[in-house]
Amino acid sequence: MPDSNIKRLLKFITRPLVLILILTGTHSFAFTKNGDTARVATFKFKTVVIDAGHGGKDPGAGRGTSVEKTVALAVALKLRDMINADLPSVNVIMTRSTDVFIELHKRAQIANDAKANLFISIHCNSSPQTEGTRRGAEILVYGYSRKGEQMEAIRENASIYQEKDYAKKYSGYTTNDPTYFIVLNAFMQKYRDQAIKFGKMVSDEFAEHDGRRSEGVHEQSLLVLANAGLPGVLIETGFINTPADAKYLMSADGQSEMAASILRALKKYKKSFERG
């Protein structure tokens, strides 16, 4: 085979591989144009977006003084303050810091615009009964039924376009290139894996450190997560319509305990995210 054809073949094979390795952080090394290996820069966890569910005219679940929007905001604010104190290098962005209504698509867009590394949406669960008996937390990640929406969000938020001189480094890489779709799928799977990983860490903290019941990590079709082009979880902190859970959720001690558990999980996740 002529040398020119070999070079074209190698370029076709290695370019998707290099892009996937660099953009998803699945390996510490990548191939250079000369076929050698080069160290890929270590990823840094820089920004987390905390989303307090509901707000303003939308109270969420619950009734009377025990309402979801109040719990979500209280836990979110405590978590923000804890991160600022313990992880000063991490930029914390809130979708809301007061009792205001923010549309779902805007919440995800805040995270996308910030090029955040993680999206944490805080909520309360509720059962169909007026007064329930179910207790405990649950962590939700986006469902595959909405993967088309997240694919679009990832496309708009793709890290390749954030890099300096990306046009020069990735010349020939366009939306018409099959490599484009390979990379987007790799992004989506990587973000899903990262969300599940963080979700399990939060669940373990709730159960093992706080001694609370946790239903673990589950998949659900959620608009706020589907529109986020980054790893994201929705934390159901407990059942607001179950008296025992509601008492815990509305208490300052309970809110601080939940925020501290999420912080411990975040520290572990950050450490694993910034592997060498």
Image (spheres, helix red, strand yellow):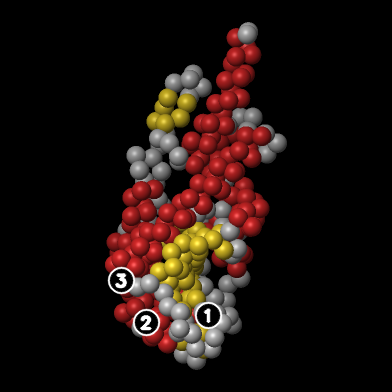
Q: Residue furthest bottom?
A: 64
Mark 2, secondary structure of its residue = helix
Quadrant where the C terminus is found in the figure:
top left
Amino acid type indicated by mark 1:
Ser
Mark 3, secondary structure of its residue = loop
Mark closest to the chain's N terminus, 3 or 1: 1
235 left or right, relative to 89:
right
- Residue 200 figure quarter: bottom left
Image point 57% across, 32% down: which residue? Answer: 16
The residue to which callout 3 is attached is: 210
Mark closest to the chain's N terminus, 2 or 3: 3
Quadrant where the N terminus is found in the figure:
top right
Q: Which mark is residue 127?
A: 1
Q: Position of residue 111 (x, y in %)?
A: 52, 59
Image point 51% across, 40% down: which residue? Answer: 23
Q: CA distance from mark 2 to mark 1?
A: 17 Å
162 left or right, relative to 71:
right
Q: In the rendered image of this protein, does residue 183 appear above or below residue 134?
A: above
Q: Nearer the viewer, residue 201 or 16?
A: 201
- Are the residues at dot 2 and dot 1 in contact (C-beta closer than 8 Å)? no
Viewer can see residue 93:
no
269 left or right, relative to 155:
left
Q: In the rendered image of this protein, does residue 234 appear above or below residue 164?
A: below
Amino acid type indicated by mark 3:
Asp
Q: In the rendered image of this protein, does residue 210 appear above or below residue 43?
A: below
- Residue 198 figure quarter: bottom left
Give the class, few, some or many, for how many residues have Cα within 10 Å of label 1's Cα (few <14, many ≥20): some
Which one is in front in this view, the residue at disc 2 or the one at disc 1?
1
Image point 61% across, 29% down: which residue? Answer: 171
Q: Which mark is residue 248?
A: 2
Mark 1, secondary structure of its residue = loop
